[in-house]
């Protein structure tokens, strides 16, 4: 199966004069079983409008198209578009857009699509993107509150571990807290590097992020919450009081008082704090900043 897909990809490469671009993170999936696992893990159905980011030669796109109402496939590389068009020639529910995802207004795109087709029950995002832009794209979609039900994406195995990490572990960090604030996270499968052509240097994993309807904690100032998390983990070996001293002009002693107020021992480190404790601390710091403002 893998061999057949590899040969097909090589043929396509020759026919269209297509060259894999390292800069665009072009490592294409060659294993149909992984494709099936991703599509099943994304829990897509006929009522869905799916935005696929980085379709490449269309391995995933074809499988998604068979199960959903419509796929919009957004691909930056114009040289891969003829390959994609050929792969999808018998699918009439796929729209290919040759664009950089980072330049697209997804809110507007989804709004327009919903006006065109009122039957869509939900929007889902699926992507296998270059590793260096995957995390910023995921965080952008979550922070900008793009109205999607879920994001299913391929990430570097270590990133999947960080996103899925439990409090107190080495992998636990700002990314774990932030993603879990927005989503219920589950891992769909591991994908060894041998499953791609050309073969990347690292193994991957596919995760499903189901956007929470209700957040697990109440936050007064979301941006402030993420800032506190970032500052706490910036020097993760330091105690919280030291790591946060100077944050927004709050001196060490005052930060110690705020930690006491939040019921957090100031000698603890960031990796020992669960999401509720971060929320409580961020809310107390926000109230302190607000109280110190001079009108
Ligand atoms: N989905 C295909 C697969 O699984 O075989 C291809 C995956 S490949 C890892 C990543 C794809 O994302 C490439 O086709 C690449 O050209 C595309 N890509 C890279 N940066 C992009 C961007 N900013 N916007 C849209 N597509 C991008």
Image (spheres, grey):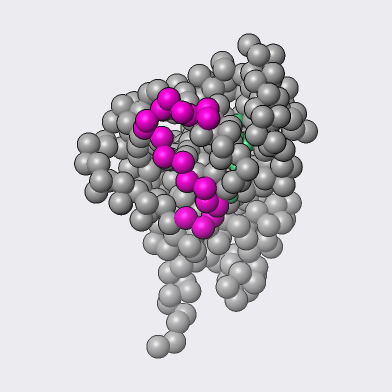
Report whether residue 157 is seen: no
In the image: residue 11, left or right of residue 227:
right
Residue 189 sits in quarter: top right
Q: Quadrant of ligand 1?
A: top right
Q: Quadrant of the N terminus?
A: top right
Report whether residue 132 is seen: yes
Q: Quadrant of the C terminus?
A: bottom left
In the image: residue 114, left or right of residue 292:
left
Where are the magenta residues, as a range? 86-104
> Which residue corresponds to the image point at 36% horizontal and 56% vertical from the top-left?
108
> Which residue corresponds to the image point at 61% horizontal and 39% vertical from the top-left?
80
> Which residue corresponds to the image point at 66% horizontal and 29% vertical from the top-left?
15
Residue 103: within the magenta?
yes
Marks counted in the figure total: 0
**Where 252 falls versus 79 (above or below)?**
below
**Where 245 falls versus 274 (above or below)?**
below
Question: Residue 70 appears at what percent x and percent y?
Answer: 35, 34
> Which residue corresponds to the image point at 65% horizontal and 20% vertical from the top-left?
8
In the image: residue 51, left or right of residue 9:
left
Farthest residue, direction left: 118
Residue 162 sits in quarter: top right
**Where 254 falls versus 38 (above or below)?**
below
Farthest residue, direction front: 15
In the image: residue 180, left or right of residue 112:
right
Residue 8: within the magenta?
no
Question: Residue 39 appears at what percent x and percent y?
Answer: 47, 24
Question: Residue 18 appears at what percent x and percent y?
Answer: 68, 37
**Where 253 falls versus 102 (above or below)?**
below
Q: Nearer the viewer, residue 183 or 54?
A: 54
Q: Nearer the viewer, residue 105 or 73?
A: 73
């Amino acid at each position: 199966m893998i061999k057949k897909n590899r040969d097909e990809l090589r043929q396509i490469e020759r026919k269209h004069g297509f060259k894999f671009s390292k800069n665009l993170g072009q490592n294409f999936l060659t294993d149909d079983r992984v494709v099936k696992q991703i599509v099943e893990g994304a829990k897509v159905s006929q009522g869905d409008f799916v935005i696929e980011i980085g379709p490449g030669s269309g391995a995933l796109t074809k499988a998604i198209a068979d199960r959903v109402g419509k796929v919009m496939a957004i691909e930056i590389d114009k040289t891969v578009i003829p390959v994609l068009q050929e792969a999808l020639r018998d699918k009439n529910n796929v729209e290919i857009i040759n664009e950089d995802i980072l330049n697209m207004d997804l809110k507007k795109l989804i709004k327009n699509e919903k006006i065109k087709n009122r039957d869509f029950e939900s929007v889902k995002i699926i992507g296998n993107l270059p590793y260096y832009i995957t995390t910023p794209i995921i965080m952008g979609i979550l922070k900008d509150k793009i109205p999607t039900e879920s994001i299913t994406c391929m990430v570097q195995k270590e990133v999947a571990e960080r996103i899925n990490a439990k409090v107190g572990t080495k992998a636990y960090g700002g990314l774990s807290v932030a993603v879990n604030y927005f989503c219920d996270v589950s891992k769909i499968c591991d994908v060894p590097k041998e499953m791609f052509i050309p073969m990347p240097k690292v193994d991957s994993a596919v995760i499903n992020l189901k956007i929470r309807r209700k957040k697990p904690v109440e936050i007064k100032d979301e941006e402030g919450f993420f800032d506190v998390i970032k500052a706490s983990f910036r020097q993760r070996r330091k105690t919280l009081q030291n790591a946060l001293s100077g944050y927004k002009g709050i001196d060490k002693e005052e930060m110690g008082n705020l930690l006491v107020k939040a019921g957090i021992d100031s000698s603890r480190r960031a990796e020992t704090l669960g999401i509720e404790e971060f929320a409580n601390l961020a809310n107390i710091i926000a109230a302190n900043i607000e109280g110190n403002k001079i009108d």
